Image: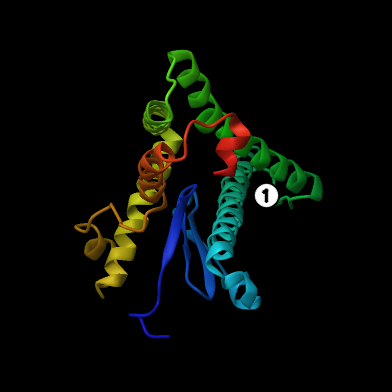
Amino acid sequence: MNEQALQIGGQAVIEGVMMRSAQIVSVAVRRQDGSILVRKKPFVSFIKRFKVLSFPILRGSVVLIESLVLGVRALTFSGDVAVEDEKKNERKNNNKDAVPEKRGWLASVWLGLTVLFSFGIGLFIFFYVPLILTELLGAESGFMFNLVDGFLRLSIFLLYLGAITLMKDIRRIFEYHGAEHKSIFAFENKKDLTPAAAKPLSRFHPRCGTSFLFIVMVVSIFVYMFLGKPVDLGDRLLR
């Protein structure tokens, strides 16, 4: 596959980035000693494995789920590396040999439950809370209800992003997010993949998932105006 046809995407992780093409998923994490640990794994989308999943209605859902799974795995890997480095430092300070611990099945189960819980909290904050607030504000017509509801959802989303940016660790991840965009721009513009070549490029990429989510939220405000007032959360989720 030539470079022009090769589509690269990615996301920031703890002290690193995950990059993904149509065939490979790679995660690069900076360790505390300054070295960079790289993990590469082959990747074949379910869309290519099962042609039925390539239909427009199914394709988007499959891509979303795959991106979520790959993202969680990349974050987990980077988190494991960070924890391992911390334990190595502790053992070094205590004059003990560092023995990396393997993730057990129980830890994997807890990770899955944590992701599900976080997903549920996200639905509650970004979908249900705006509905409650809009009801309390007394918006009756479908047009006004969806306008107020959409404005509240958008406001909560922006406040959420602003709030987590104040956290040092999250801000660091956002910095890697910008670096990921710069490196993709460098690749797409056939520049050298070096810090010097990528630094002057924009940290805002048109295929950014966060920007896409923002656009979807704005567009949904106008779409929902024609669908009437939602009866409950179930009605909202069905949309």
**Residue 43 showing in the rendered view:** no
Q: Position of residue 212 (x, y in %)?
A: 38, 51
Of residues 29 and 221, which is closer to you in this image? 221
Q: Amino acid at mark 1?
A: Ala
Question: Dot 1 corresponds to which residue?
Answer: 98
Q: Position of residue 50 (x, y in %)?
A: 66, 75
Q: Position of residue 51 (x, y in %)?
A: 62, 77
Of residues 233 and 6, which is closer to you in this image? 233
Q: Residue at x 36, y 58 (%)?
A: 207
> Badge 1: few (under 14), some or many (20 or more) residues near its Cα, within 10 Å?
some
**How many marks on residues?**
1
Q: Is residue 121 left or right of residue 224?
A: right
In the rendered view, would you say 38 is above or below 137? Answer: below
Q: Residue at x 71, y 45 (%)?
A: 112
Q: Quadrant of the N terminus?
A: bottom left
Q: Residue at x 27, y 72 (%)?
A: 192
Q: Quadrant of the C terminus?
A: top right
In the rendered view, would you say 26 is above or below 222? Answer: below
Q: Residue at x 56, y 34 (%)?
A: 122
Q: Position of residue 101 (x, y in %)?
A: 73, 50
